[in-house]
């Protein structure tokens, strides 16, 4: 093992909500628990207090603002790397990665920290995005991402890639024994459209066209026209800057005759209760996802999932519930699979390999691997 403690500095634009931000906090917690030093550079945000409470140190630099002026922070970052004797620099986003790369270029090679990047998403291929493949180790959050990197950046050495899927804490998603009727009643009290004895469909996700909300509406219409008194909840879609899009969804629901069986709500922190109350979880993103976290969460609770068979969602379903995969945009197949799952729910997976502890351990192993090789 590498000598302890290591000093690891993670860079990202800000510390607001999101998978990148959550992963940053989770790795900082793991570093502190292991006796290492955890530093994070960002513009700050609502997760900063939690980061600092975990024992990490935050340094505020606005390294995510998309402007050439942002590159001036490379000098301040280089000074920080020297003063803190940083061993590993871990960039999680493109502009912060460019700033880190510029900072490292100005340092003596023998004294400079090792450079790690994580490809969290399937960004459009470009010279700008290519910086995420320049890490001495490039962490890919799924096999889907690894394949994407090698396809679009063929000069990347596969030996530098490490697949480390995101993970959940299984204790935070306890397995249920059938639909939790008390949880369903609480949801119906908050959103009357969800009341009734028929099955509840759940499509969590942001209010963007790529998340497949229209596909979910059409599925609901198909199920109800087939005699199934289904309801649909779409938590997370209703946000202030997406009012026009939500109005379009509501118009579509009226045209389909399902408006009274639909609830489109703001983001909720009670996702475990949402899963426990649901009969079926949908993941219908038209754009491939880098990873299928909601699929993992739902299956951990024991809720069946169906989703389009591409990207990280298809990858996770193939590993945990293969029968939940449906060919992209096949409306008839989606309705047929949903009917089968509602009448004969598949058994949940016995084991969930995508755990938080596995992700943390594998990431710290990458840091140790680089530290040992100096």
Image (tube, rainbow, N blue to C red):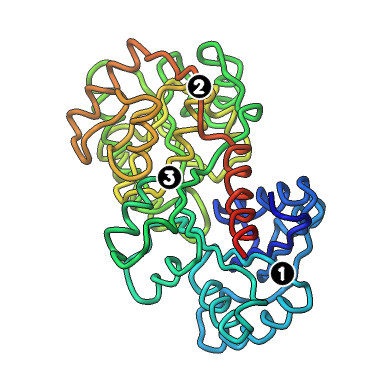
Which residue occupies the extreme front position in the image?
A: 373
- Above or below: residue 182 compared with residue 156: above
Residue depicted at 51% across the width and 12% down the height: 178
Total labels: the figure holds 3
Judge whether residue 321 can be spotted in this image: yes
Q: Residues within 10 Å of mark 3 (few under 14, many from 20)?
A: many
Label 3 secondary element: loop
Answer with left or right where residue 311 lies relative to residue 173: left
- Specify the quadrant that holds the C terminus: bottom right
**Disc 1 to disc 2, C-alpha distance:** 38 Å
* Residue ID for mark 3: 291
Residue depicted at 55% across the width and 21% down the height: 184
Q: Which mark is residue 149?
A: none
Q: Nearer the viewer, mark 1 or mark 3?
A: 1
**Disc 2 to disc 3, C-alpha distance:** 18 Å
> Residue 361 or 261: which is nearer the viewer?
361
Label 1 secondary element: loop
Mark found first going from the N terminus, 1 or 3: 1
> Residue 300 or 105: which is nearer the viewer?
105
* Residue ID for mark 2: 351
Q: Quadrant of residue 167?
A: top right
Residue 216 percent location from the top left of the image:
32, 36
Mark found first going from the N terminus, 1 or 2: 1
Answer with left or right where residue 348 lies relative to residue 16: left
Residue 68 percent location from the top left of the image:
51, 88
Mark found first going from the N terminus, 2 or 3: 3
Q: Are marks 1 and 2 in contact (CB under 8 Å)?
A: no
* Residue ID for mark 1: 86
Residue depicted at 70% across the width and 56% down the height: 47
Q: Quadrant of residue 39?
A: bottom right
């Amino acid at each position: 093992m590498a000598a302890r403690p290591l000093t690891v500095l993670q860079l990202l634009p800000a510390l607001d909500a999101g998978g990148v931000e959550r992963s940053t906090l989770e790795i900082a917690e793991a570093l502190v628990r292991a006796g290492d030093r955890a530093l994070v550079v960002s513009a700050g945000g609502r997760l900063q207090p939690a980061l600092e409470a975990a024992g990490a140190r935050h340094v505020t630099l606005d390294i995510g603002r998309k402007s050439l002026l942002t590159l001036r922070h490379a000098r301040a970052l280089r000074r920080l790397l020297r003063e803190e004797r940083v061993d590993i620099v871990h960039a999680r986003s493109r502009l912060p990665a460019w700033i880190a790369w510029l900072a490292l270029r100005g340092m003596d090679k023998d004294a400079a920290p090792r450079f790690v990047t994580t490809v969290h998403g399937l960004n459009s291929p470009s010279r700008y995005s290519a910086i995420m493949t320049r890490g001495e180790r490039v962490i890919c959050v799924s096999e889907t991402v690894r394949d994407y990197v090698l396809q679009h950046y063929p000069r990347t050495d596969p030996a530098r890639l490490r697949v480390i899927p995101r993970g959940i804490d299984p204790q935070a998603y306890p397995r249920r024994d059938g639909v939790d009727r008390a949880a369903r009643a609480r949801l119906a009290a908050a959103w009357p459209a969800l009341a009734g004895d028929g099955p509840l469909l759940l499509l969590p996700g942001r209010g963007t066209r790529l998340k497949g909300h229209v596909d979910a509406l059409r599925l609901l219409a198909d199920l109800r026209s087939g005699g199934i008194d289904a309801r649909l909840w779409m938590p997370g879609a209703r946000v202030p800057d997406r009012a026009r899009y939500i109005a379009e969804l509501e118009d579509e629901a009226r045209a389909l005759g399902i408006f009274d069986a639909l609830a489109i709500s703001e983001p909720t922190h009670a996702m475990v209760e949402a899963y426990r109350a649901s009969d079926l979880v949908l993941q219908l993103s038209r754009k491939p996802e880098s990873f299928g976290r909601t699929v993992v969460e739902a299956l951990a609770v024991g809720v069946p999932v169906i989703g389009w068979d591409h990207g990280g969602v298809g990858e996770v379903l193939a590993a945990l519930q293969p029968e939940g995969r449906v060919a992209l945009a096949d409306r008839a197949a989606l309705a047929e699979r949903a009917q089968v799952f509602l009448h004969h729910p598949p058994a949940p997976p016995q084991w969930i390999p995508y755990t938080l502890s596995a992700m943390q351990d594998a990431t710290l192993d990458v840091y140790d691997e680089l530290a040992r090789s100096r």
